[in-house]
Image (cartoon, rainbow, N blue to C red):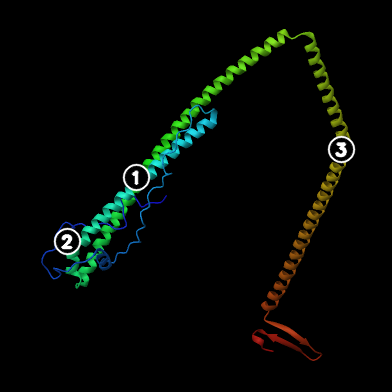
């Protein structure tokens, strides 16, 4: 069942409807409600036709008292919650019906009034003044938003009231279930105590045949457990070589990996040592070359060529 918000309608009366049009530029000009909304720039969805509540929408009949256990408590809880929800829906329907009737009466008074309402008269006076018309529209739309907000607040109040009642029902049901659980636990403890007392009396009054039967059952149980233990032992003995072989294989693999890792580490150390030695030799050779070059540049002249008849010298600055 769907209905509009309680005490809210898609069309709301405008403050000042009780006034009578006075003098002014728009005196004598009447505006119907739809025309008024059009000039204000407000549009509402079409109003759905009012549907009466179905006859079946009535609080359900209370289940027969004396239901057994959890099933009876569940039926009682379902009836209480359904009744609460049904009453809330019926209340919403009645509020919606009253709101529609009030809306219709207000709109009929608006359209059938001999004199234009004060709000319509004010609108007529500002129709030819764009700035004043815009301010008037903004004021009306702000009032419309305020009314819509109030309608939502009333709807949430109704919903909150229903949820509070439903929560109270759930709490009452939970409390009843808690008490029932405590009573059942107490009955269970008493039954266990009675059972233990009966068992003690039975053990005291049990005759020899019963003892022998218990002994036979115990022996059979021990024999069964012994056979099971022997089978488990055989299975373990069968699986032991496989487990040892797997363990030895894993140990060999681990040793092989350790050996390979050690070889790789030694090879890496050797490579690092060779690299350091090669770098040292390279630096020594470079140092010797630099020293020779410094010695050559330190001399004033250098013999570049010797012949049987003379020497060719190279002085600093490239003079020969």
Q: Percent x, y for residue 54?
A: 41, 47
Query: Which label belongs to residue 118?
Result: 2
Residue with the most extreme front position: 55
- Give the mark, 3 or 2, whose residue is nearer the N terminus: 2
Q: Earlier in the sequence, mark 1 or mark 2?
A: 2
Q: Position of residue 287 (x, y in %)?
A: 71, 69
Q: Secondary structure at mark 2?
A: helix
- The picture quadrant where one finds residue 247 is top right
In the displayed structure image, the side of residue 311 where residue 230 appears, left or right: right
Disc 3 is placed on an element classified as helix
In the figure, is residue 232 to the left or right of 17? right
Please name whichever residue, 93 or 305, is drawn nearer the observer in this view of the structure: 93
The residue labelled by disc 3 is 239
- x%, y% of residue 9? 31, 55
Q: Based on the displayed image, in which of its 4 quarters is residue 125 positioned?
A: bottom left
> Gap in Å between the C-alphas at discs 3 and 2?
103 Å
Is residue 132 rendered to the left or right of residue 69?
Answer: left
**Mark-to-mark CA distance, 1 and 2:** 33 Å
- Label 3 packing within 10 angstroms: few (<14), some (14-19), many (20+): few
Q: Say few, some or many: other residues with alpha carbon within 10 Å of mark 2 (under 14 / 14 to 19 / 20 or more).
A: some
Mark 1 = which residue? 157
In three-dimensional space, the C-alpha distance between marks 1 and 3, rounded to whole angstroms, equals: 74 Å
The nearer-to-camera label among 1 and 2 is 2
Q: Nearer the viewer, residue 226 or 61?
A: 61
């Amino acid at each position: 069942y769907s209905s509009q918000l309680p005490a809210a309608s898609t069309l709301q009366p405008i403050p000042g409807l009780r006034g009578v049009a006075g003098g002014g530029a728009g005196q004598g000009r009447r505006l119907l409600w739809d025309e008024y909304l059009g000039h204000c720039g407000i549009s509402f969805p079409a109003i759905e036709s009012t549907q009466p509540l179905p006859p079946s929408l009535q609080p359900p009949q209370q289940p027969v008292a004396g239901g057994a256990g959890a099933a009876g408590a569940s039926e009682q809880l379902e009836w209480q919650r359904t009744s609460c929800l049904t009453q809330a829906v019926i209340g919403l329907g009645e509020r919606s019906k009253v709101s529609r009737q009030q809306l219709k009466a207000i709109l009929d008074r608006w359209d059938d009034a001999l004199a234009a309402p004060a709000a319509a008269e004010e609108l007529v006076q500002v129709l030819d003044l764009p700035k004043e018309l815009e301010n008037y529209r903004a004021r009306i739309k702000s009032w419309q938003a305020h009314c819509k907000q109030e309608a939502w607040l009333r709807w949430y109040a109704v919903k909150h009231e229903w949820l509070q009642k439903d929560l109270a029902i759930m709490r009452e049901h939970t409390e009843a279930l808690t008490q029932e659980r405590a009573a059942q636990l107490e009955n269970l403890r008493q039954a266990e105590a009675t059972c233990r007392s009966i068992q003690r009396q039975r053990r005291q009054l049990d005759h020899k045949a019963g003892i022998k039967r218990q002994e036979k059952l115990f022996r059979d149980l021990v024999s069964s457990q012994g056979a099971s233990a022997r089978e488990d032992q055989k299975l373990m003995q069968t699986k032991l070589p496989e487990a040892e072989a797997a363990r030895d294989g894993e140990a060999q693999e681990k040793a092989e990996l350790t050996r390979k890792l050690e070889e790789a580490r030694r090879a890496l150390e050797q490579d690092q040592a060779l690299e350091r030695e090669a770098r040292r030799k390279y630096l020594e050779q470079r140092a010797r070359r630099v020293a020779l070059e410094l010695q050559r540049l330190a001399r004033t002249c250098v013999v570049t060529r010797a012949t049987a008849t003379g020497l060719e010298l190279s002085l600093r600055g490239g003079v020969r």
